[in-house]
Image: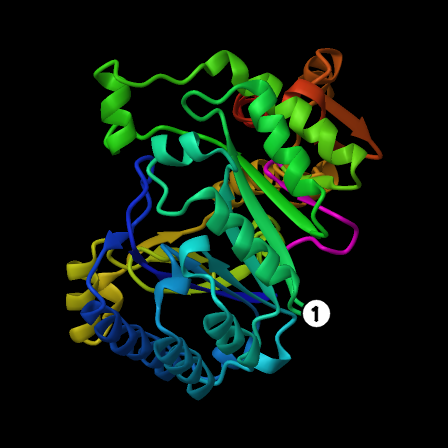
Amino acid sequence: MLGLYLHIPFCSKVCDYCDFHTIQSPERLHLEYLQLVSAEISAFAERHPGALERVETLYVGGGTPSLLSPELLSRLFAALKRAGIPLKELREATMEFNPESCDEERLAVAVENGIDRVSIGLQTFHEDLLSRIGRSHVKGAGQYALELLLRRPGLRVSADLMFNLPGQSLDGFLGDLDRISDYPLGHISFYGLKVDPRSRLGRRIARGEESVDEDLYGPMYLRGVGMLAQKGFERYETSNFARSGEESLHNLNYWRRGEYLAFGPGAHGFFEGTRFYAPEMYASWRKYVLSGCPKSGLTLDPIGPEERVAEYLQLSLRTKYGANLEALRGLGRRLPQPAVDKWVDRGYLTCQNDVICLTGEGWLFMDSVVADLYSNLE
């Protein structure tokens, strides 16, 4: 399956914890971005005739895609159509919305152009926590946006929360999760805060002005998983939970090492055996596009046999489907049974029918488990 990721780099306000490639920008840049990303897509289409017509999933992310005006959103979708992307025939088309820019007009434009799935970034329902992490919306805006999306017939809605925030209690997070899971949602994601020391929040923590209780990370995650399971949401990836049939096809394609194209500053793609990304800073990306999008302007990472093995192990174990030991042997590597049994005995892995899966606290120590398994490959 071929997916397409489109990165919108703008935010009304950059969150205090953010380490993504986003910028707080005046609206005049939005039109320039539209012209540039259209040119980037066209350049790819000329070099790879027919490729864009094979796209099956679309993910418009950021940043804040919903920050674009309805007019510019219409023009963006028109550019995708001109490039040959069959928007109305895709298996799935997702767009991210933030509460402060989620309204009827923008939503109507998105749905009219084939968007059938929306991801809304709520993070928490606690006003004080929203302020402490520098979010640009208030509690009431999040609730309004969620209810607006859920009123749209046929629209699949996913909601995002965060945990292990500064000042957040275990009961506070579980209360957020209990509340969000009572809405008629098909998909919920929750992510543990990872503090970039270069972010505003990271600098405040370094100065001792703020703190995060790392001892709460494990209990928040494990009890959150248990709560969602009781409410009918199955963990199909470490941070993603869905009712049956509501899994994100686009994201599953990532974890199954499928191909995906990517456009916009810093957007990462995987095509014809090579991972790639364009310049990350907006000014550098603008220069790259204006110079005709030369291949030399991309950062390229060809995937060889060893990289394929490492990626297969790492990405597969992120999901409930696990890693198939026979598939590893097909990639030319073998995992000795004692290396697996060590983690099974600790209660971190299961092994059934030649498939290994994380279990219990193994999800918390995924990186260590994967690194150890990889080091034992023969």
Q: Could you tell me residue 372's position as x and y percent? A: 55, 20
x 56%, y 82%: residue: 86
Q: Quadrant of residue 167?
A: top left
Q: Report whether residue 253 is seen.
A: yes
Task: State how many labels appear.
Answer: 1
Q: Residue furthest front?
A: 140
Question: What's the magenta bit mostly, secondary-structure-wise?
Answer: loop
- Vertical arrangement, residue 147 with respect to residue 132, above or below: below
- Vertical arrangement, residue 108 with respect to residue 273, above or below: below
- Horizontally, is 8 left or right of 165 in the view? left
- Vertical arrangement, residue 160 with respect to residue 130, above or below: below
Q: Residue furthest right?
A: 353
For the residue pair 5 and 72, the one nearer the viewer reads as 72
**Span highlighted in magenta in the image:** 238-248
- Horizontally, is 69 left or right of 249 in the view? left
For the residue pair 243 and 37, the one nearer the viewer reads as 243
**Secondary structure found at label 1:** loop
Q: Please name the colour scheme applied to the rendered image.
A: rainbow
The type of residue carrying mark 1 is Gly
* Residue to which mark 1 is pinned: 154
